[in-house]
Image: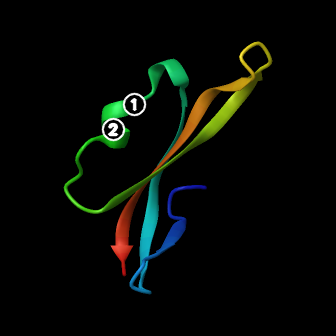
Amino acid sequence: MTPGDLVDVARLDGSVATFEVQTVRRVAKDRFPTAQVYGDLPGAGLRLVTCGGRFDPGTQGYVDNIVVWAALVGT
């Protein structure tokens, strides 16, 4: 994903919320921006988190997270 991409989220009422990607960052798991990802927002927002970076065979996991920040642009 890159800034400007749109993400559609289907809602239970049948409507669709559209979010625009603002920022994509790769962050070390030991420096995860908890407050930025899970903190309060002034409006509707979407945060997508997945694994990324180098795979560490010792821990059987990736050393980083990829975090996407997106803002509501329409319904």
Residue 7 x/y as whole percent: 52, 68
What is the three-letter code of the residue carrying label 1? Answer: Pro
Which residue is found at the position 63% from the left and 37% from the top? 51
Task: Kindly give the residue lying farthest to the top in the view shown.
Answer: 58
What is the three-letter code of the residue carrying label 2? Answer: Gln
Q: Is residue 54 above or below residue 72?
A: above
Q: CA distance from mark 1 to mark 2?
A: 5 Å
Residue 18 x/y as whole percent: 44, 74
Q: Nearer the viewer, residue 63 or 11?
A: 11
Task: Kindly give the residue lying farthest to the left in the view shown.
Answer: 42
Q: Secondary structure at mark 1?
A: loop
Tell me the quadrant of the picture where the C terminus can be found. Answer: bottom left
The residue tagged 2 is 36
Picture mark count: 2
Tell me the quadrant of the picture where the N terminus can be found. Answer: bottom right
Q: Where on the picture, by quarter, is residue 45?
A: bottom left
Q: Where on the picture, by quarter, is residue 65?
A: top right
Q: Secondary structure at mark 2?
A: helix
Please state if 20 lies on the left or on the right of 50 as rendered.
left
Marker disc for residue 33:
1
Q: Are marks 1 and 2 in contact (CB under 8 Å)?
A: yes
Which residue is found at the position 44% from the left and 65% from the top? 20
Check disc 1: other Cα within 10 Å, few if <14, some if 14-19, many if 20+. Answer: few
